[in-house]
Amino acid sequence: MVDQEKIQQAVRLLLEGMGEDVEREGLLETPQRVGRMYAEICRGMDESASEHLSTTFSIDSDDMVVERDIQFYSLCEHHLLPFYGKVHLAYIPNGRVTGLSKLARTVEVFSRRLQLQERLTSQIADALMDDLGAKGAIVMVEGEHMCMSMRGVSKPGASTATLAKRGVFEGDQALVDEFFRLIGK
């Protein structure tokens, strides 16, 4: 649970540490705004993908289900700066499918936390396997990290790609190739 009062206290200290006057008109409400912002963008801390993926429907097919270009926004746990991009995912049903919006909600659950892109990728793949009982899952995340774009090495536009394969995707290169063809990569 996000403690907005603690965040507000920390923001006041941060502003003071930066040499700002926390009583300046433009900063008077900043601690409260930042507290509300963190409650919103870190709401995935209090959510479970299982809640969303528990709604399933019977299906006679085991054809690949693909959803691509799911936009996400997250915060790097190392610098508390945003990273954002797209998630492409697929799974092979094992007699049950979930609603397509539930896949996007699953991405939201994990991206709305302090995060590493590598962990985000794995968590989504694991949820598809564990909560859907899928025969296989594959997840590709493409992200731009503000900690690389606006500080440090300062390379805006650099993209990081991560991939997680589970179940039948681990040993079937033709299936992996079909996934990449379907997402246009």
Image (spheres, helix red, strand yellow):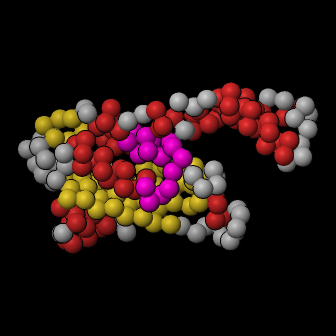
Q: Main secondary structure of the magenta part?
A: helix
Residue visible at 57% across and 39% down? 41
**Residue 171, position as x, y percentages in the image:** 18, 69
Q: Is residue 94 magenta?
A: no
Query: Residue 86, can we see it?
Result: yes
Tell me residue 20's x, y (percent).
Answer: 89, 43
Is residue 122 shown above or below 24?
below
Q: Position of residue 86 (x, y in %)?
A: 46, 55
x and y percentages locating residue 141 in the rendered image = 43, 59
The number of numbered badges drawn on the structure is 0
Which region shows up in magenta? 105-119
Give me the residue at 50% from left, 56% from top.
116
**In the displayed structure image, the side of residue 164 where residue 144 appears, left or right:** right
> Is residue 101 among what the camera can see?
no
Placement of 17 over or under 34, stated as above or below: below
Q: Which residue is at the front of the view, 15 or 162?
A: 15
> In the picture provided, is 136 more to the left or to the right than 27?
left
Q: Quadrant of residue 27?
A: top right
| Residue positioned most to the left | 60
Q: Nearer the viewer, residue 142 or 75?
A: 75
Residue at 11 percent of width and 43 percent of height: 95
Determine the residue positioned at 47% across, 38% down: 44
Give the position of the C terminus as an image quadrant: bottom left
